[in-house]
Image: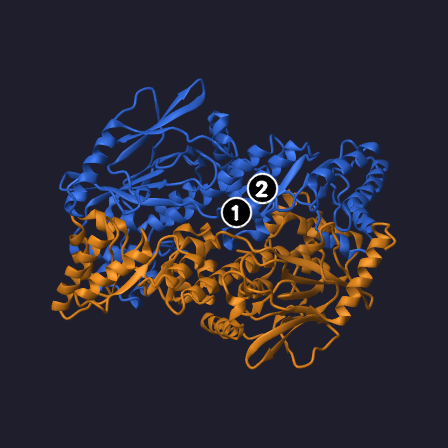
Chain colours: A blue, B orange
Amino acid sequence: MSEALRTDLYQLTMMQAYWKSGHKPEATFDYFVRKIPAGSYLVTAGLSYVLDYIENLHFEDNDIEYLRTQGFNEEFLDFLGDFRFTGDILAMPEGSIAFPLEPIIRITAPIMEAQLVETYILNKMNFSTLIATKAARVVYAARGRGIAEFGLRRAQGDGHLEATRATYIGGCTSTSNVLAGKIFGIPVSGTMAHSFVTSFEHEIDAFRAYADTFPSKCFLLIDTYNSIEGAKKAVIVGKELEQTGEKLQGVRLDSGNLSELSKGVRRILDDAGLGYVKIVASGDLNEWKIDELMRKGAKIDLFGVGTELITGRPAPALDGIYKLSEVAEHGRHVPRMKLSEETVKATLPGKKRVWRIVEDGGFVKDVISLDSEVVDNAVPLLEPVVKNGKLICNRPSLVQIREIAARNLAKLPDEYRKLEGAPVYPVELSSGLTALRERLVKKIRLEEIGLKI
Amino acid sequence: MSEALRTDLYQLTMMQAYWKSGHKPEATFDYFVRKIPAGSYLVTAGLSYVLDYIENLHFEDNDIEYLRTQGFNEEFLDFLGDFRFTGDILAMPEGSIAFPLEPIIRITAPIMEAQLVETYILNKMNFSTLIATKAARVVYAARGRGIAEFGLRRAQGDGHLEATRATYIGGCTSTSNVLAGKIFGIPVSGTMAHSFVTSFEHEIDAFRAYADTFPSKCFLLIDTYNSIEGAKKAVIVGKELEQTGEKLQGVRLDSGNLSELSKGVRRILDDAGLGYVKIVASGDLNEWKIDELMRKGAKIDLFGVGTELITGRPAPALDGIYKLSEVAEHGRHVPRMKLSEETVKATLPGKKRVWRIVEDGGFVKDVISLDSEVVDNAVPLLEPVVKNGKLICNRPSLVQIREIAARNLAKLPDEYRKLEGAPVYPVELSSGLTALRERLVKKIRLEEIGLKI
């Protein structure tokens, strides 16, 4: 299916207006985030989708046919029939650490092309980056314990696949989502539901049936009726497994006071000589609850996290935006910015680069500069990925992207990873960019608003 | 693509355990919601997806191949190769009003079939119902003003299509999402972005170019630099349009104090004789902000709502669940329930029906009964939709579903639609169901927990 129509109608109406008015400069847009919903950093994700989209972007006949029913101009529709993306893109690699205001993707293309792709880029980048970042926070809270992603049933419909992919980039260890496992090669995990237990006459019948089917990878859900009583039955089944030379792998708690219950269950298991049996906990967990459980010394070896992880709850959207920073026509490059009543909604003008200063393997600060500036002893974060419409970058595998993210997260000083009260990571504007912004603000105030400031 | 693997791994491991143990009762499961994130009611949506899924459910060769790599039993994989859904489904039609604990879908099938479909049903129903309900609240707050859905750029990735569909079911009037327009026939709307304005040397150049391209459907975005100054320029272009026999359709505000600005802009337009020009407002709106704007007498004719609507923010997930209520084997029907440490997580046992008492065209109260009970003078809400695996219901169009929702919402007394402080709608349990639940709680306490209560 063509993705060309996965866009806002106004992109197409603007395109027709550009086309008809003959106003067709080359334009540079930045994808960046104004504000991070929780914490100080972002783990970028979604670029793989953007690159596939750019490479395949075209309008199919039935797309054109649909637009005809919406009253678009026939000659403009002819133009769309031959439409391809021909511009240049720089981007931070997937799995990068980014901060507010930093261009994560920079697109330079004829304005109609750069405009059309806005919505898709926002749709894909905002969501994957949101979830990869959330996952990194949850993984951080678990202090080395694994995080199994369990969210498919509460995922936002067809968004489930890219969400699961993003949780893996952010550091989760497995998913319950079999389709995501098949498509992306993510390890899958899962054992039994309450319905399995209640479908049998007695809880222990269910445990025995499961152990008999999966003697070497048996996890038992013990909270259907009462977690402590469930643990005692798990001990019986664990002992029965030992007699066949197998070992019960674990038990899962899914409700109640997980800290207290995990300690009680751990004691029951240990007292019975089943110290090797792991305890998995789930049930509306998030980074804050996991952190609290760890601080209380809960005896939990693995966390299953669903809803909060897969939707980013309580912040289900990242306010990433895509803003024009420069137009160029007849060799003249003119920086652009939005001013707005709300200062936070103003944008940074001009074609820009992002630099990171790294010392002793740790991130120290970033600088956003004009394209023409060079920041000494700093690593440029934007890499060329598309040139004249063609992909020119390596395409790392998902496992490699996950490793890139892990390496980057390891270089982010621990204070910035704190769940609450993390300081703002220093992102400076270069002298050139600062001067340009001041000059443009004055010009707009004078010419567009009539203020002489 | 087959959707069979859009499931949690544990559904498949449980299936293999059922299969191997020979424990294959017929099972009845209910899909219901424990708690509504905001407000007192739900607008159900997503059933169309569930019916398509049920009708087409099968495992493809590459699904089986993938499961083989995950260590499933060969004979079990053979069984999956021939797998089809053969059970019965009752459901509330899409666009119904539902309340907590009421079965929205009731599935009776061999337990392996009923188990497999759980995750897909939860994934699709939870999300569509969440968003249709959110949309109904936003539409209610707007008191008859239209709601244009603008959320694609902040939607949860590929979840965008079904989200947009759900906003339309909930009463939104249009979408910016062109692909959703093409696929579902939803009216599309949209005009221009800030980048269109900033791409021109001056704001008024952008306005003129747009008016020239769309003289009969021109909306101008006036807040790029300053909304009041933008409105004055819109007046100039509006006057120019009048001279060509056309009329400026509207202006859009996207930032700042929308109540104050809309009044100021209305005055500027009216003073210039452009009383016919509509004012559209957008910018992180939701039901509460729209309600406040309406109460403040904002001069807004149409609201554009994006992020909050498309993700359900601040509650991006509905905690709909799918619970076993009965198993039947050898002609013996045994009701089942989950007890749990947390009372709210207990479930209602037995095969059930839902009834609604309607007086003078308004909903009065609902009753959940056992399947064998009849509630007098009440409308049964669950309708047969699948029998022996075959669809047996009409498939209303999206427009019809939207009308069903509107008719139902009109019958819900206004007090239950209040954004805050709506009373709990009365949902009673029948005497038969109450008695069964009490009997089962005692039995479980005695047999599974060893308590003599």
Task: Give the labeled residue for mark 1.
Answer: A313
Image height check: is A284 above or below A8? above
Circle 1 Cα neighbour tier, 10 Å, few/some/many (<14 / 14–19 / ≥20): some
Task: Give the labeled residue for mark 2.
Answer: A286
Front residue of B335 and A210: B335
Secondary structure of the residue carrying numbered label 1: loop
- Where residue A273 sits in the image (x, y, percent)? 83, 31
Judged left or right of residue A66, residue A110 is: left
Task: Output the chain of dot 2.
Answer: A
Front residue of B269 and B155: B269
Image height check: is A368 above or below A110? above
Which residue ends up furthest to the left in the rendered image? B243
Which residue is at 14% across, 71% downward? B245
- Where residue B447 sits in the image (x, y, percent)? 86, 53
> Is there a contact, CB below 8 Å, between mark 2 and mark 1?
yes
Q: Amino acid at mark 2?
A: Asn
Which quadrant would the C terminus of chain B be assigned to in this image?
bottom right
Asked if residue B35 shows in the view, the reply is yes
- Where residue A231 sits in the image (x, y, percent)? 79, 42
Image height check: is A59 above or below A306? below
Mark found first going from the N terminus, 2 or 1 = 2
